[in-house]
Image: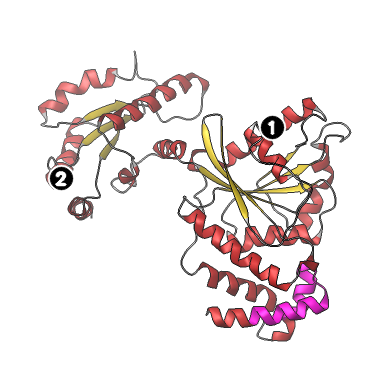
Amino acid sequence: MLRRLLRTLTEQGDLHLIMYCVRSERVIRTLARNYELIHSQVERKVPIVLVITCLEAYKPDMEEWWRVNERAISNHGMTFAGHACITTVTMGGSHMERRAQSYDAVCKLIQQCHVSSIIAARYIFPILFVPYFLTIISRNKRKNVVLFGMGGAGKSSLVNLIAGKNVVKTSSDVKHCTLQWQSYSIEFDGDSYNVFDTVGLEEPQLGIPQYLDAIENAYSLIQKLESQGGIDLLLFCMRAGRLTATLRSNYRLFNEFLCEKKVPVVIAITYLENEPGEMDAWWKRNKDTFRHQEFHVAGHACITAIEGSRPDRYEQSRTTIRKLVKELTADGKNQARKGGDNLFVSFMQKLKELLLGSSNPKKIAPRLIKRCGLSPDVARQLADRIKKDVVEAT
């Protein structure tokens, strides 16, 4: 299988670098046998580099392994385009310095081989390719964060809070009719993000055409993000208050339909500058309500996004929300959700399944009323549109 894979990728010109990853205690004889197998398939067309792991305790330094074993490697006929002696240990303060050295060593190794990315290496050794190297890819990738919520929740102010400067104008003149978006490039703590500020569905009286337009615009947003690596995080912004049916509807739209529950959702509760005691006390009082309403989130941030009101709480809020975003998108731990050619059809089918629950069309309107809070008249009209659009889409 390995031989066939190497041959195929070489012929297609899709193989740029082979990273031979071995543990430090592996004997040279075994290393040489595997090297011959790889080298016989690619000859000199593709550089082969050696990465030696588990050297966190090697004395006096990690590079000593290479100095000790370099002659034996050469005697066995192995020639590498480069090497890196590293550790991939993520825990333990005593190893942090060596971990940082390892990161620099691997980056330098890639640069020396003139390889623009190490993604190809994942296809060579899926078993030996340690997750640590994936952090290099994720550090160079801009994470896509989709921000959603109702008008007046402070989404624009939240973007400015995360950015640390005014990158978007805030306005009380909110006219929400479709799921349009604005994209903002934000950098902090050494990472880069694309934050997509969307316009969420408002009260149920929004109207049928706008409701379906919102679905179509949501689809186009996913298509846009697909070309940029997918969605890494959903950030739901709500104003401190009651968990309404409209908020639950917005949550389901993004979490269940658009991302099929495959993207982590975090919630930012705003306008807590005057909260007695700690701002996080709001969440402690209300978290049971979210759980009972099946409103599940991977994390929360109780904040204020109003600059100047409480400077101490404003800076605290920036630290809190940045930490939350960074943790939930770090090290490639969440594979970005991507769309597909049939996403809209699938989306409409899922909406139909949710609303129908059976083959009886008469049950669509009651479910719209109960689940989305629509008036009976709007629900009946919307049910007809859904049935018609699903038939046309399929």
Does residue 128 appear in this view?
Answer: yes
Residue 234 at what x, y percent from top left? Answer: 62, 50
Quarter of the image holding residue 320?
A: top right
Residue 255 at what x, y percent from top left? Answer: 63, 58
Rounded to the nearest whole Å, what is the CA distance between mark 2 and mark 1? 51 Å
Q: Residue at x 73, y 33 (%)?
A: 317
Judge the density around disc 2: few (<14), some (14-19), many (≥20) Cα neighbours within 10 Å.
some
Please say which color scheme the image uses. Answer: secondary structure
Q: Quadrant of the N terminus?
A: bottom left
As drawn, 187 above or below 181:
above
Quarter of the image holding residue 386?
A: bottom right
Amino acid at pointer 2:
Val
Q: Residue at x 83, y 34 (%)?
A: 273
Quarter of the image holding residue 269?
A: top right
Find the magenta span and give its range.
Answer: 364-387
Element type at marker 2? helix
Judge the density around disc 1: few (<14), some (14-19), many (≥20) Cα neighbours within 10 Å.
many
Find residue 42 and name its label. 2
* Nearer to me, 103 or 72: 103
Find residue 387 and name its label. none
Residue 179 at what x, y percent from top left? Answer: 65, 59
* Nearer to me, 35 or 258: 258
Q: Residue at x 13, y 26 (%)?
A: 74
Q: Is residue 45 left or right of residue 179?
A: left
Earlier in the chain: of badge 2 and badge 1, it is 2
Q: Which residue is mark 1?
A: 318
